[in-house]
Amino acid sequence: MTDLDTIAKLNDYEDEDIFDVVVKLEKSFGMKFNRDAFIHIKTFGDLCDVFENHTNYENRDDCTKQQAFYRVREAIASTQQMSRDNIQLATKLSDLFPSRDRPQKAKKFKRAVGIDIKILTYPSWLALTFALVFLLSLGALFYEWKIAVSGIVLFITAIKIAENLGNTLVISTVHELTEKLAREHYVDVRRTKGTYNKQELLQTIIDTFSNDLAIEKAYLTRDATFSWTKSTATNKSIG
């Protein structure tokens, strides 16, 4: 049985974490809000309402994820010189992007799909090494600022190089790639620009919060509250 105390909830996250996801959703939906737009929200439903109330696209009932799959399939087929029939949702990306020339094929795929979607990264051990270098550089600020600055510059440069040369897949299947594309680049995937599927809006918000913050979708209800709601309640009780 799952320990309920260990399950991530919306109010476990600080406002910075929440608004990182909001910024990602803004980009996906092609919107731009002032932070004040969310100043009065208390629940997940309030946040969803802000997005819905600011959406001025034409509503169409076509499926965005289906369009994303067709786009992914076409991009892979054209760049890998293979039949579309061999590209299914369950197809493993490791079969489509062999390790030997994976970075080059990934770049060709992104050019063909027309969206800069991240599908490769560097190994976790390298990420830990970068984190250690960064922490040591910060610590050096108390002793020798020149060494600290050099370490931070080295850290930033190494990150950029690693991102370009990364060979580790961040997702496993065509299905996951399709989901990621539709979730993170919603308006860009749509076949007809300036349109959206109203029924998909809420689900895309839920999918993004669930994916980025590791919150089970069952806990992303309209009544789910944010961490600042607890602070407000505490202040009122003190007052």
Image (tube, rainbow, N blue to C red):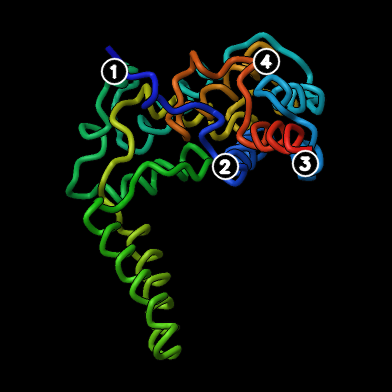
> If you read the primary sequence from the N terminus, does the residue marked by circle 4 or circle 3 appear first?
3
> If you read the primary sequence from the N terminus, does the residue marked by circle 4 or circle 1 appear first?
1
- Mark 3 — residue? 33
Amino acid carrying mark 3 in the image: Phe
Which of labels 4 and 3 is toward the front? 3
- Measure how far apart labels 1 and 3 are at the Cα level: 37 Å
Amino acid carrying mark 4 in the image: Asn
**In the image, residue 8 lies at what x, y percent?**
44, 28
- Tell whether 123 sits left or right of 4: left
> If you read the primary sequence from the N terminus, does the residue marked by circle 2 or circle 4 appear first?
2
Q: Quadrant of residue 20?
A: top right
Which of labels 1 and 3 is toward the front? 3
- Measure how far apart labels 1 and 2 are at the Cα level: 36 Å
- Mark 4 — residue? 197
**In the image, residue 194 lies at what x, y percent?**
75, 27
Which of labels 1 and 2 is toward the front? 2
- Depth check: 137 or 94 in front? 137
